[in-house]
Amino acid sequence: MPLCSCGCAEPHVVAQRETADGVRLSIWSDAAVTHGRLGRVLVGLGAPRSRFAQRARAAAVRLLMDEVGILDINEIAPAIKAAEKTYAHTWSSDDARRAFVLHKIAG
């Protein structure tokens, strides 16, 4: 489940966001999240192994893409991981899912 609908098969940057502490992130069509000029992958994020894990990663990145600005760089990977885990459960809405993830990260 790519984050982009352009039809290009090669991974490419679909969005760039800045974290609360000023780090610029690149969000890729294959749901990878990188930072810095060299495109370093976030520590603790790893590559999803199964098809379900790939879909959960894409959904988690899509869910949190616009929330990046309120999180520090060291909170991004745990937030994505927490959001991925919610996709194994039933939720009433993405808003409820997003609120749960942000609450979990906050404390």
Image: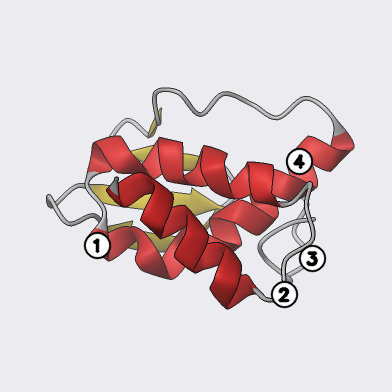
Earlier along the polypeptide chain: callout 4 or callout 3? 3
Closer to us: 30 or 100 = 100
Residue at x 77% of width, y 37% of height: 53
Earlier along the polypeptide chain: callout 2 or callout 1? 1
Eye-nearest disc, 2 or 3 = 2
Disc marking residue 7: 3
Earlier along the polypeptide chain: callout 4 or callout 1? 4
Q: Is residue 38 above or below residue 1?
A: above
Disc marking residue 92: 2
Amino acid type, mark 4: Gln
Q: Is residue 93 above or below residue 67?
A: below
Q: Is residue 36 above or below residue 45?
A: below
Residue at x 58% of width, y 51% of height: 12
Q: Which residue is mark 4?
A: 54
Where does residue 52 sit, x and y in percent of width and height? Answer: 85, 41
Secondary structure at badge 4 equals helix
Disc marking residue 70: 1
Residue at x 44% of width, y 45% of height: 79
Where does residue 97 sit, x and y in percent of width and height? Answer: 59, 64
Q: Residues within 10 Å of mark 2 (few under 14, many from 20)?
A: few
Q: CA distance from mark 4 to mark 3?
A: 18 Å
Q: CA distance from mark 2 to mark 4?
A: 22 Å
